[in-house]
Each structure stands twice: as C-alpha cells, then as structure tokens.
C-alpha cells in the first residue's frame, strides 16, 4: 500500500452563496463536506487510480469523528489515523457567483508530546507495509518544526521512497534529510531557495538534499529536476477552473508513477493530467476521470535524460 | 416544566477573524459552538432563571448528534428532540474586528410527513406536563405553513398557555388560532398588520386573535397590548452590544413571568432587563446575570391597566 501522512487533517466544508457581502446575512444554497488535509486528498486520488492507500496523522473531537465516518465511506482508503485529545479543524470555503472562494480556516488542535511520540511509533509500523509514503501539509501546534526531517529519515531507513509536500521551515528542514521527491509550487520553491527562476530554483533545491524536485508552475504545468534528467511537462491547453486539490492530485500522480516504476516523463504526464482534470472537475478537489484519460496522452513533455 | 418548540434547530458556530475580505483566505482566531435555534436559546435562559425547561423539535444527522451532545451538558434543559432522517443545519457567524457579523445559514433539513405526524403526537404528550409552551422560529421544509396554528390549538385544548415567536405566513396563521402571547419585533409586526406605528400595529395584531401582543422595539424596549392593559417598558440607558439572542431572552422573561403569575409590568421589566443583559454580554446569546439583576429594578414601565 501507499501511505500518506496528514498531521493536520481537516473537515473541508464548501458553502455556495449568491454574493458574499460582509456584515450581511446569507442563505447557503449548497453544502458539501469531505475529509480533508492534503494527504487525505492524495489518498482518495490514489484509490481512484486503483492503488491501495492508507492514511495516517491525527484526528480528534467531534469534527474528527465526523471526518472518520465520512472516510469510512471512501472505497480503497484505509483509516490509520491516531486519535488525539484536541479537536480536528474545519475549513469553510465560501464560493459565490463569481466562482471565487473566501476561505475560513479554523486553528488546528495542539498535539501533546505523548501523542507525537505515539504517532512516530505507529508510523514506523506502517512503513513496514508501505511501497511509498507521502508527507503532506502543515504541522499542527505541538509538533516540532523538524518533524518531517525525522519522518523522512525513518522512511529512508525502512527503504521506503518518500515524497515531501510542505512549505516554509518544515520544508527547509525536511529537504536536508534527503527525501526522494519534494513537490513545491513556485512560491514555496522561491521561499526555500531565494530564486524566482523555477529551473534554477529546482536545481538549487536538489543541491540542498532532495533527490528529485518537481515544481508545480500552476497552469503552465510542472518542471522536474532529478538524478535521471530534467523535464518540463505542459498541459495541452490553457485550463480554467478551481485549482483546489490540483497539487494533491499531482502528488498522487507522481507517487503512483513511482510505485509503478514509470519513467519520469510518464510520471510527469500523469501528474499534469491529473492536476488538470482536478482543475476542470465541477466539484472542488475531485478529478474528472474522462478528462484525465483524454489529457494524459496529450501532455507535452520536453527535456533530457542525464548521461548514464 | 416549561416546554419550548424549535422545529428548525441549528448548531450555531461563531468564528472570530481579523477582517473579513471576500475572495481571500482567513485564519479563524477563535471558534465557539453551541446548540441553537430560538427555542433552545429560550430554554437555556429559562434554566438559568431556575425553571425546568424541556426542548422539543427536530434533530438529525451528524450535526444533530453534535448538537445533542452539547445540549446534554446544559444543566436544567431536558432534551425531548425527535430524530429525523435529514441533517440539522449549521449557522456560521463571522465576527470581525469591527464587531459586525457576517452570517452564513445552511438550509435546514426537509421533514417528511411521517416525521411531522410523529412530532405532533409527541408534542401532545409533552403538553400534559407543561406549565407553558413557546413555539419559536422558522419552519423547516416539509412542515405545513399552518403548523403553528395547529400547535397553538393543541396547547389551548390542553389548557397550556402558549407563546408564539415567528414571522411571515406562519405568524399570520398562528395568530388566528388565538395564542396567549405573540412577540413580534417591529418589522414582523408591520409585515403582519401593514402598520409601521407599533402601538396601532400591536392593537391590530390583538384584533387578529392574539390575547396579548408584546412588540420588541430593539434598543427602545418593549410595548405590550393585553386584555389587562397596555404598557411600554424602556431600559434605563442606551445599550450597545450584540443583539443576537436578545429576543429569545425576552421570550424567556415573558414565559417565566407568566408561569410565576407576575403582573404584566413586572413581566415586561424582566423581559427588557434580560434582553439588555444579553446585548451587553461578551458572548453572543448569553446573558450577563449581574447586569440583569442590576437593570431589572431600573426598567421604566409606563401604561395603564384596563378598566376591570
């Protein structure tokens, strides 16, 4: 199975309203609710691609209970979340007639030192059965800033390929622990390296320790710097839609490609097509399978393999 | 016990944010959550005043389960809510640094004809032990618009004094069934009677069937038209604060006064003081007991009793 770690899970709520006007009252016309946090989104896409996915991380309180109930109805995703005393956060995305989103994010729970220790132990047990692991998203309060570095090292010790998708100081420290893949967006990459030129920044991120760097460039696709070569993958046409979850779908594409031992150009084509099929899907964070299958053959990948 | 009916219960969530700016992302700094819907608020104030309160109405889904859990921790309030297949709504109040509120109200559940029948039966059983009943708030989908008229008649048949606090067509039909008290605000009263002059409108509402009409005039207090006379009650000073729940506290004041057989001027003084103590409380919908006890003796009541 492929393991995904989400230390800061969330219940993602989407409200549709006509027009969001501060200091007035709104009738919500549509409510959707789903288990969230980046690793949970990645696992859902992996399951849709036919991979067995197990999710771990923290969950707690009444919102945590609702999240687990909904997760139990998601085919192909196994719940290995650890219960904590704190309460899982909700995120509320208010979408109005413009199609734009106003986001309200509850603070996450605080994790105790004992809970963090218990997680590390459970994580090592889960690694024993994992063919790959993705470490996804922000860290909740109480988890040390070097947490991902430790989890990367544990995965490498267990010989499990590890992908890291986070930002800021947790990314900086995590990269130094030499993960197999990091997947920053252009902004995260610039914050890590100080360079706003993605190709140069990706190369620099590799020097800092990551074996492969896949930078997402939004609508322009993705750029990969790896030991096997460097490539750029571009969707066949300009896409308009909701980018929520597009990065998580890309992670699922990269991870499934890694486990299936696809060559890098094919992994990137899959990641870009999944990402595009997520942007184009009517429901935020879901991907449109027909669109994915149509696009995956049309993604343009350019670049070159390194000399062996 | 005093019975309160809330057909459209809600889980009331309050988010504090710095500044609500549409189409941007916000960190919520504080989350509070409590069982809501007008009758539940009334019951909580009744319990705080030392009265036994029982709440009934509909509850369902995961939000309904959270609501009941929280209600079970409310001392003095007995849960006689009826489970339904639909899901109880949430309301999200976003309070920013201006102190103003942006409200997002989920649609309520749809109630089936069988659920509505089951409720009417349960309600008649509950009336047997009730010293008074309050019918509060909007009607969920699936409940007939004449619902309150039927519940008023059942209460009168059971010899239980009944207060109706709703608006629009359910109020219009409910008034015709001759409730003991209706408590519209100035706007609801104008909608019912066509008159924007509260004294005249309250008199007209009595002619339409209500035995007593108590109109809330916001910061200016309350006005009562009853068979025993007509009065006006004014808080001792101008109040600034959050009016959420002020009307529900007033209903609790009127109902407790009715059950304790207080003369009308004392009932009104209590209702106005509770309402003011709710506006002044730091938490929306709670009342400040010290403020209530200070104000209740200072409310100015003018008017006259009818000739016997």
Image (tube, coloured by chain):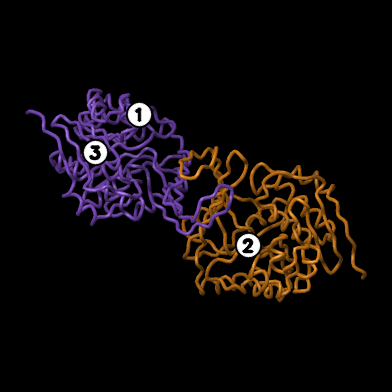
Chain colours: A purple, B orange
| Residue occupied by mark 2 | B137
Q: Residue B203 in the image: x percent, y percent?
A: 80, 68
Q: Chain of mark 2?
A: B
Q: CA distance from mark 1 to mark 2?
A: 49 Å
Q: Residue B131 in the image: x percent, y percent?
A: 73, 65
Left or right relative to A82: residue B4: right
Q: Chain of mark 1?
A: A
* Residue at 63% over, 62% down: B137
Q: CA distance from mark 1 to mark 3?
A: 22 Å
Q: Residue furthest left?
A: A308
Name the element at disc 1: helix
- Which quadrant of the figure contains the N terminus of chain B? bottom right
Q: Chain of mark 3?
A: A
Q: Is residue A188 above or below residue B95?
A: above
Residue A94 or residue A79, whichever sits in front? A94
Are labels 1 and 2 on one chain? Answer: no
| Residue occupied by mark 3 | A222
Q: Residue A86 in the image: x percent, y percent?
A: 47, 39
Q: Residues within 10 Å of mark 3 (few under 14, many from 20)?
A: many
- Camera sees residue A231: yes
Identify the mark at residue A170; answer none if there is no mark.
Answer: 1
**Location of residue B170 by image quarter:** bottom right
Q: What is the total number of numbered labels drawn onto the structure image?
A: 3
Q: Residues within 10 Å of mark 2 (few under 14, many from 20)?
A: many
């Amino acid at each position: 199975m492929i393991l995904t770690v989400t230390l800061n899970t969330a219940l993602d709520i989407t409200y549709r309203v006509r027009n969001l006007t501060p200091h007035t009252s709104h009738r919500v016309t549509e409510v959707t609710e789903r288990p969230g946090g980046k690793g949970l989104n990645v696992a859902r896409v992996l399951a849709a691609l036919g991979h067995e996915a197990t999710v771990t991380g923290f969950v707690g309180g009444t919102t945590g209970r609702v999240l687990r109930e909904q997760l139990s109805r998601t085919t192909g995703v196994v719940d290995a979340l650890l219960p904590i005393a704190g309460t899982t956060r909700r995120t509320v995305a208010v979408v109005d007639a413009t199609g734009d989103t106003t986001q309200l994010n509850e603070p996450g729970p605080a994790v105790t030192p004992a809970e963090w220790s218990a997680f590390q132990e459970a994580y090592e047990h889960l690694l024993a059965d994992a063919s790959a692991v993705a470490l996804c998203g922000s860290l909740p309060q109480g988890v040390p800033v070097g947490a991902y570095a430790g989890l990367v090292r544990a995965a490498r010790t267990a010989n499990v390929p590890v992908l890291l998708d986070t930002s800021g100081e947790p990314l900086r420290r995590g990269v130094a622990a030499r993960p197999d893949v990091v997947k920053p967006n252009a902004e995260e990459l610039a914050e890590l390296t100080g360079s706003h030129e993605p190709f140069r920044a990706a190369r620099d991120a590799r020097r800092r320790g990551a074996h492969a760097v896949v930078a997402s460039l939004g609508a322009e696709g993705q750029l990969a710097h790896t030991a096997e070569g460097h490539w750029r993958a571009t969707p066949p046409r300009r896409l308009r839609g909701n980018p929520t979850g597009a990065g998580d779908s890309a992670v699922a594409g990269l991870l499934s490609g890694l486990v299936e031992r696809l060559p890098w150009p094919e992994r990137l084509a899959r990641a870009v097509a999944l990402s595009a099929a997520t942007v184009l899907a009517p429901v935020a964070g879901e991907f449109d399978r027909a669109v994915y299958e149509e696009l995956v053959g049309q993604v343009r990948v350019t670049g070159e393999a390194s000399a062996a």
